[in-house]
Image: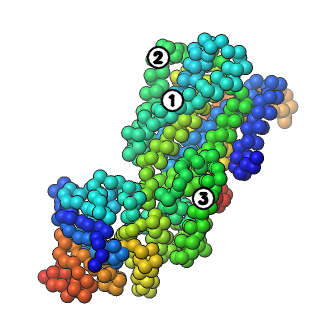
Amino acid sequence: MSTSLLQLTNVTIRFGGLTAVSSVTADVREGELAGLIGPNGAGKTTLFNLITGVYQPTEGRIDFAGEGTAGAKPFHLTERGIARTFQNIRLFPSLSVSDNVRVAFHRHLEHRTWQSWLRGGRFHAEEAELRERTRELLSLFNLERVQEAPAKSLSYGDQRRLEIVRALATGPRLLLLDEPAAGMNPSEKDELMRLIRFVRDRFRLAVLLVEHDMKVVMGICERIHVLEYGRKIAEGSPEEIRVDPKVIAAYLGD
Amino acid sequence: MVFPVAQRWLLAALILAGVASAVSGSMDPYFLDVVMGVGVSVVLASSLNLINGFTGQFSLGHAGFMAVGAYTSAMLTTVVAPRLGWNPLLLQWVFFPLSLIAAGLLAAVAGLAVGAPSLRLKGDYLAIVTLGFGEIIRVVLQNMDVVGGARGLTGVPAYSNLFWTFGTAALTVYTVWALLNSTHGRGFLAVADDEVAAEAMGLDTTRYKITAFGIGSFFAGVAGGLYAHLKGYLNPGGFSFDKSIEIVVMVILGGMGRHAGVVFAAILLTLLPEGLRELGSRSVPNPFGGADWSLDWIKEMRMILYSLMLIVLMLMRPQGLFHRSERRRRGA
């Protein structure tokens, strides 16, 4: 058994009188493909926002790679190795496809902002290397043919893929995917499942997937956490979750 | 020594400005005044473009930062410089640029002072805060007797020449261009496009916005210094809300976040009122015989015509003058 990369301990968040997430304890292991499911309004996206530092938990703690994340801003956590995609695609629409990826690479840059003013040899060398890495990454996902097009001109599926590529450019150890299958047809979903597995194996990272689509979740996740009304009601392999009476009750009603 | 293409352009522009400056002695003073005004406008518009266009913030306080710079450098050259006992050439070529840098730095400090606490505000709200700040600066200057108060500051030496105005304009355009055409610089555009996503991609969005504000106000301050030593007279009223709006219009008309477009709009909008004034002093021959028709009415309606032209331009090209053509070349 591998160690926990992400550990949530009794995480609770309240917005005024509403407890959106209540005492959730869960973990994602190194290199694991984990899923997070639950009916609408169960608190899945809120949990994502807690993990990525958009919200701070009211109670409980979150540890990433053995260190607490309290007080860290989203960009700090990205630097520490958490990358995400969004439920509603949030690319940089006016930037070109390659610039979308290039921006995400920026934390690996050695040169400082003022050096782009002087434009010395080091600046050019690093920018050239970055262009090459961007091109490589894009070609891996079959997007290099559109690399100069503005991101908003891409098809829906390509935009979803570009969002994943952009997240990968930050060099994450944990990739959070927020409903990547939303709005996809069955063949696109099959394609997506292959893609997620490929990403995990190729980049050796852990994936936490929020998804409504049972076929996708059951098809690729190794372990699934189930939320209902902000509480965790079950955890286990797809086979266990499928027959868990509490999960069936949550989805189908008693 | 081999310079990359961009630096070669900058160097060429500086040499050109130097040559033009050397021969400017024989030029018509009014013409020279207008041309230097164009240079100052280019500095103002390009620097505001970094804030409003590229980084997607909305500042209405550019005239305020310009005022900080204008008064800083004017005080330096009118109060401090005479005590140094330097010869005039040294004052114009060494002391004056130093005073411009001081003007820029102080304006940048002012910019950071407004920017740091208010950049969590977005859109209209930020616009209102910056507008308020610009007005505060103007009112403070109006009530400061050391700088002449409402009477204004007179006797500012005419150190601005073609070299300093166009040299600064070239440097500003280069700086904004160089900053944007880099991986770090693409961060400004990313922040403008989607702040949440930018933050999630590891960009410190607050730092980006503050950087844009700092650099933008630095150049606004330098432009103020140039302006002061061009007009020879400063009046707080010259840095009112109208002036900020004028710069914002240049940025919008040039097409928010288009280098060339904004430079072009700055030139156009500075020349337009002067051109109309010039036109108004002429007359056309009367085709029915008799006395020539005077175009005096243009002179009187100058500002109305100017506003009408703005409205027509905005209706015809709401995306700005240069929108599409430049976007295609932005792969660099």
Up-down: is B313 above or below A250? above
Above or below A143: residue B98: above
Residue holding disc 2: B144
Residue on which the image places disc 1: B106
- Element marked by disc 3: helix
* Amino acid type shown at disc 1: Leu
Q: Residue at x 63, y 40 (%)?
A: B172
Task: Check if mark 1's residue and mark 3's residue have beta carbons within 8 Å.
Answer: no
Separation of residues labelled 3 and 2 (CA atoms): 49 Å
Pinpoint residue B176: horizontal percent, then vertical percent: 60, 45
Question: Disc 2 marks which amino acid?
Answer: Met
Name the subunit of mark 2.
Answer: B
Tell me the element at label 1: helix
Q: Is residue B189 visible?
A: no
In the rendered structure, the answer to whether residue A134 lies left or right of residue B289 reads left
Q: In this rendering, would B7 be left or right of B52? A: right
First of labels 1, 2 by sequence position: 1
Which percent across, then down, holds residue B268? 68, 40
Q: Nearer the viewer, mark 3 or mark 2?
A: 3
Q: Judge from the rendering whether residue B94 lies leftward or rightward of residue A30; answer left or right.
A: right
Q: Residue at coordinates 48% horizontally, 19% vertically from top-left?
A: B142
Residue at mark 3: A127
Quadrant where the N terminus of chain A sits is bottom left
Real-space CA distance between mark 1 and mark 3, rounded to the nearest whole angstrom? 33 Å
Q: Position of residue B285 (x, y in %)?
A: 84, 32
Amino acid type assigned to the residue bearing label 3 in the image: Glu
